[in-house]
Structures are given as C-alpha cells and as structure tokens.
Amino acid sequence: MTPVYLALGSNLDDPAMQLHAALVELAALPHCRIVAASSAYRSAAIGPGNQADYLNAVLMLNTSLSAVELLSATQAIEIKRGRVRSERWAARTLDIDILLFGDEIINTTTLQVPHPRMAERNFVLYPLAEIANHKMVLPSMGVLGSLLAKCPRGDLVKTNVSLRNLADSK
C-alpha cells in the first residue's frame, strides 16, 4: 500500500457537504483506505472573477492503485459531484489533487507529483501539517516544517468543519 496525500477544495454548492461527500466516495474506492483527514480551512479564492471563499482539507490514504488509476478515480468523483472544467482556477464544486504519492516524482502531461504549487499554498501546507509529521520530506521540495515556516498563514482560517469523525468511521 502506498501512502498518498490528497487535497480537497470546494467553493460551490455547499462546500462542507462537497468535502464530506468526497471523503465518503474516496473511502468507498477499492484498494483504498483513508488513514487521516485534516480539519477544513477557509481561504480566499485564487482565480478569475469574484468567487466565494474555498473550504480546503487534506486526506491521507493508503492505496494499492497506481497513481494513474487514482487520478482517474478522483476525476470521476469530481465529475459526479458536478465539476466542470471550463477555465483555470474557476469556481468549482469539488477539486481533488494528488499532492504526494509515496515518495514518487511523476511528471506527465496529465499528472505532476508532488503537486507543483503545493509549497506555495497555505491552504495545502497547513492542513497537510495537521495530519503529517513536520519532518516529512516532500520529494524535490524539502522538509514540510521548513516549507511551512516560509509560507505565511495569511487569511487562512481553520474552521469547525471536521472530516476526522467521518474518516475515523471508515
């Protein structure tokens, strides 16, 4: 089983419900077991137009799926939840990104792991640090604690929306 970290984000159609639904669907994937889930964090949208704030969280799961199989499964979940890919960084019902896939470095036209911008994003690093060891080394990026120290929290707010109880029951 490979340890995998996924980032979840939503700013449309009841974001808290979207994150919960994603967790349920990820937990139901064959050959996958959710190990940990962060709290949800509220952040300002990055992207075009006047968008609602995002809710973001990070999950750790163990899987025997390949990275490509997991990507296909997460994209199917996004589509099922109403995701429409129209414009980069547009508002969305659900976004699931593969942040880390074991210690692999993957660079294809469809998948880049580690996620290329994760070291710059407080809405990824802070939830990740909540469920991962700060001494964890992110391939080609460095130590999580060092990356976190260089990434200001800014307007990121930890909410009372918790995916932990749901993750613990799976």
Image (cartoon, rainbow, N blue to C red):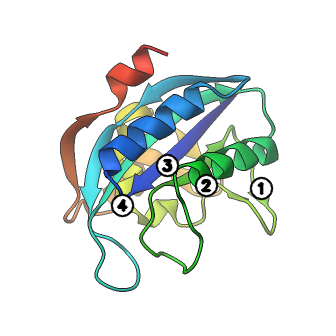
On the image, numbered disc 2 is attached to which residue? 79
Mark 1 residue type: Ile
Mark 2 residue type: Ile
Res. 135 visible in picture: no
Q: Which of marks 4 and 3 is in front?
A: 4
- Percent of width and height locating residue 73: 70, 43
Q: Which of marks 3 and 2 is in front?
A: 2
On the image, numbered disc 3 is attached to which residue? 7
The answer to whether mark 4 and mark 2 are in CB contact below 8 A is: no
Residue 17 vs 115, above or below: the answer is above
Mark 3 residue type: Ala
Earlier-in-chain disc, 3 versus 1? 3
On the image, numbered disc 1 is attached to which residue? 106
| Disc 4 residue crowd, few under 14, some 14–19, many 20+, Cα 10 Å | many
Q: Which of 50 and 114 is in front in this view?
A: 50
- Percent of width and height locating residue 128: 42, 43
Residue 30 vs 131, above or below: the answer is above
> Which element type, helix, strand or loop, lies under badge 2?
helix
Residue 73 vs 116, above or below: the answer is above
On the image, numbered disc 4 is attached to which residue? 12
> Which element type, helix, strand or loop, lies under badge 3?
strand
The answer to whether mark 2 and mark 1 are in CB contact below 8 A is: no
| Disc 3 residue crowd, few under 14, some 14–19, many 20+, Cα 10 Å | many
Q: Which of 82 and 66 is in front in this view?
A: 82
Tell me how far mark 3 sits from mark 1, CA to CA: 17 Å
Q: Is residue 120 left or right of residue 72?
A: left
- Percent of width and height locating residue 9: 42, 54
**Residue at position x 58%, y 78% from top?**
86
Mark 4 residue type: Leu
> Which element type, helix, strand or loop, lies under badge 4?
loop
> Which element type, helix, strand or loop, lies under badge 1?
strand
Tell me how far mark 4 sits from mark 3, CA to CA: 16 Å
